[in-house]
Amino acid sequence: MRSILCIIFFLSGASALIFEALWFRQTGIAFGNSVWGAALVMSAFMGGLALGNGLAARYGNRFSRPIFAYAVMEIAIAVTGLTLVLVLPTLAGWLAPVFRPIIDMPLLLNSLRLSIAFGLMLIPTTAMGVTLPLLTKALSSYDKNFGSVLGKLYGWNTMGAVLGVLAAEIVLIKWLGITGSGLLAAFLNLFAAFVALRIEKTAAAQVNGLDSEPVKLPERSKLSPRVKRLLFGAFLSGAVMLALEVIWFRFLLLFKDGTTAAFAVMLGITLAGIGIGGLIASLWFKYRPSAHHFLRVFILLGGILTVVTYRAVDWTFAFMLSRGYFEFQEFVFVAFFLLMPVSMVSGLIFTMLGHAVKEEIALETRAAGLVTFANTIGAMSGTFIAGFILLPKAGMEKSFFLLALVYGVTAFIIPAVSGPRYKIPRLLSYTMAAVFLVSIWLFPFGIMKDTYFINVGKKYYDFEGSKIAAIREGLLETVIYMRKDRFDEPLYHRLLTNGFGMSGDMVSAKRYMKLYVYWPVAVHPDLKRALLISYGVGSTAKALTDTKNLESIDIVDISPEILEMSSIVYPDPDAHPLNDERVRVHIEDGRFFLQTTDLRFDLITGEPPPPKHKGVVNLYSQEYFQLIYDRLAEGGMVTYWLPNHLLYDEESKSVIKGFCNVFKDCSLWAGAGLDWMLVGSRNAAGGVSMEHFSRQWQDPVVRPELLEAGLETPEQLGSLFIADALMLKQFTEKTLPLTDNFPMRISAKQKFGGTYSVLFDAMMNETEARERFRQSAFIDLFWPEEMKNKSMRYFEYERMIKSYFQPRYRDKKSYILNDLHSVLTRTSLQTLPLWMLDTEKREQEIVDQLIEEGVHITEMQLLLGKRAIAERSYTKAVEFFESYITSGNEENMSHVYTLYLYALCMDGKTDKAENVAREIASTVNSSKFDQLYVGWMNAAFGVNIPQDQK
């Protein structure tokens, strides 16, 4: 019977974590995934558990049939837990009118969130909290060794939780969806109840539901000072363990993307450690009933391991850390190394505390209930303290130090053992205390800044030469700004959140982010009110504030730190988009804002974090797009990020399918490389004039930004077209849409930007895209006829732009001089030639700034020569290249000589080009020339530049 009870409690633990995973996903939709929304839901969950623990401590021993009572609790969990799964998807609509009047009153809003979340979770979580004390009482009837019983049940239940969290996030939600997974969790509870009831029938001593005269025990109303100290120790150990969990997770996410799989692995390892610790304690108590006398030893060991594992991660995994990221298998290994030791100790501590309390209190249910109550309240407090105090105020490193100290304080609070029988525990306690003090004294302050943060930035330093400009450890994430310099001046910035490159203001990012505004401004007749969901580095926001016609701009972002740190990108307050008087900022979850606002917008645009990150997928679901549609004014438009470089083919198609199911006039547009844009509207009529369509290019503020983004003429906007609704319907015909019920249609498996896709390569083919553009009824509606005809010729140049931004899709011949020559001789474009010559507007601005300051650097001559080519000023280009060549710089001279000879030919100095080439070839190795380019110039200009000469 004891083994069977352990098995069903294992299943109960699995069910509990499945339900928890489902509830947290769904409450994120109903209450928002903001830091407050998530924290309040967690508090409601743990508060319910604590209430169940407390009720068990107060009333549990009245039950003479604890197994029967346990079965009733399992049934209650199944029924109410599943009901919650079914009700939560509809809850957002019901609650919106309640939240709407107080959306800008955080104190009242969060109080209401907590009250509703607690009320919803009250019955299932309270029932969960009762189960451990009840089964402890039941098993104690057969085994009087309380520590062994408690550790066994606690361990098996927690190991079941490991199975539940991993199964839910890796298998169940993917194949069964949210509702199906809820049904399975309820089945596990009902199965546990069924087995418990069958066992209960065979329990001879359990025949009457309740004792006719409840046992009255004075211990219930009064606890001894010793018990209070033990319970305070349980509170502190729970607090420090959950606080450590929060800090550990934040630390590990510096080196691994925060996908649902990553969180499931970290939580699974933590729970596994706790469960193993409980089982080890159970076995120890079985053979040594006085094992709890070593309680202080293990509490101090927890503090020591907190320090040692933090330091040893660098020693043990230096090579992996130096890369700045972990592969998934490496991540699992490092997480195991960091999380498992202290988690195991935590499981031992809990069991020992329970046994120690039981020695002071005769009743098993009361002892188990009090310890779990204190531990759960501590865990709830620890989560809040870590997230809202330690991380933003002290940072990860000092938090590790302070939490290690808490272990020492806890050991001091725990009553000591005395007497000659306890010589060994006392000796070990003193020894461990000495080691603990040494570890605290030698705590590796500075390693976070000097090693871990440096390693996070190293991958970007190695990749692009950028360096860390600023770091802030905030409520939601660790925000890191990288800065790429050119001649000691900022060229661009890159925003990292928890080590992941989230956004930036490099030219590729600014191009597609600002397109979200430039496109609708061109085709919408009169934009007045705009909503931006997710701020990033502010490029889209800047495009909005640059648009004079807009009367109001609402910006919603979940992270106050990201908004505050954007002054790094906009050091001039007058240029900062958040300082525009039309802007209203809302620190809130974007979906929650859409659910609760009653405003209507002419434009809603968004670039939320990548959909594979935890808590983000519901910002790409069909239901979310329906919310956007509902908040659009009549004729309003939406532009939305589709990050194909981070999604597999079927995942992108699933997002597109959901979007097009809502927006019947959906269309797909190129941005930069595989950063694409979905466009839809609420019954937009189109029909703008040529003058209106082109107006942005006449605006003195917007025009320079358009030029920098490579949108130099209005005609180029049409060349970004990929497909309209008819094409997308065919494209996604056999694909299921991404929905709230099936969020794992976007998997947690990472796709890296260089991963090649035949499917998207075909969609980016400029010849086919041009033909689709020509035949599109959507284009006929929104594009002026004259503009449509003029746009056709620019698809060829869009091919070159795509090749520049997505080298993985680049034809090997894309960068021969033929392409550059075509742009220079057939168009007036200047930005594209700059890109093809490996420079850009911002770099040229830095050069001009240095010239004004009287600074002269040799490489500036090369950059000025490239600019002169782009401006078709070939005489100047020749002069700049000659100045650079005579400086004696030998770096990348094959490229320089090729451009020099090309400039000579374009300047009509073909004879000089031949003479210069012969002179160079006769004195230096012919590798000074790129032979492919030289061959092209010989054919194009009728010159005879030598090839393959020594």
Image (cartoon, rainbow, N blue to C red):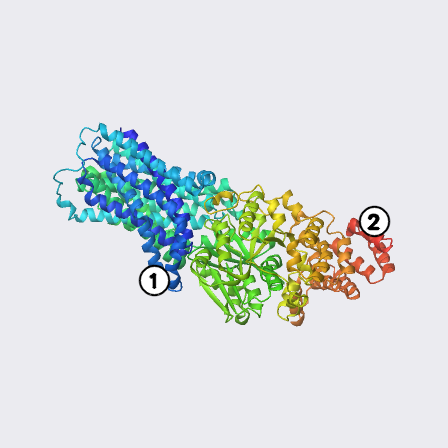
Q: Is residue 641 above or below residue 150?
A: below
Camera-side residue of 156 and 175? 175
Q: CA distance from mark 2 to mark 1?
A: 78 Å
Q: How many marks?
A: 2
Give residue 344's quadrant in the image: top left
Front one among 156 and 634: 634
Given the image, on which type of amino acid does mark 2 rest? Gln
Q: Is residue 268 above or below residue 846?
A: above
Q: Is residue 236 visible?
A: no
Q: Position of residue 588 (x, y in %)?
A: 43, 59
Q: Residue at x 49, y 64 (%)?
A: 554
Query: Where 174 sits versus 863, above or below?
Result: above
Q: Is residue 122 left or right of residue 917?
A: left
Earlier-in-chain disc, 2 versus 1: 1
Residue 937 on image: x %, y %: 82, 53
Image height of 630 relative to 612, above or below: below
Q: Nearer the viewer, mark 2 or mark 1?
A: 1
Q: Which three-letter amino acid code belongs to the residue tagged 1?
A: Leu
User: In this figure, which residue is indicated by the disc labeled 2?
Assistant: 947
Q: Nearer the viewer, residue 170 or 950?
A: 170
Residue topped by disc 1: 108
Query: Quarter of the image containing the N terminus?
Result: top left
Is 140 left, or right, of 45 in this rendering? left
Q: Secondary structure at mark 1?
A: helix
The 10 Å Cα crowd at callout 2, few under 14, some 14 to 19, many 20 or more, is some
Label disc, if present, on residue 269 of the rendered structure: none
Residue 896 seen anywhere in this rendered image of the structure: yes
Circle 1 crowding by C-alpha within 10 Å: few under 14, some 14–19, many from 20: few
Q: Residue 523: x and y, percent?
A: 62, 62
SS category of the residue bearing label 2: loop
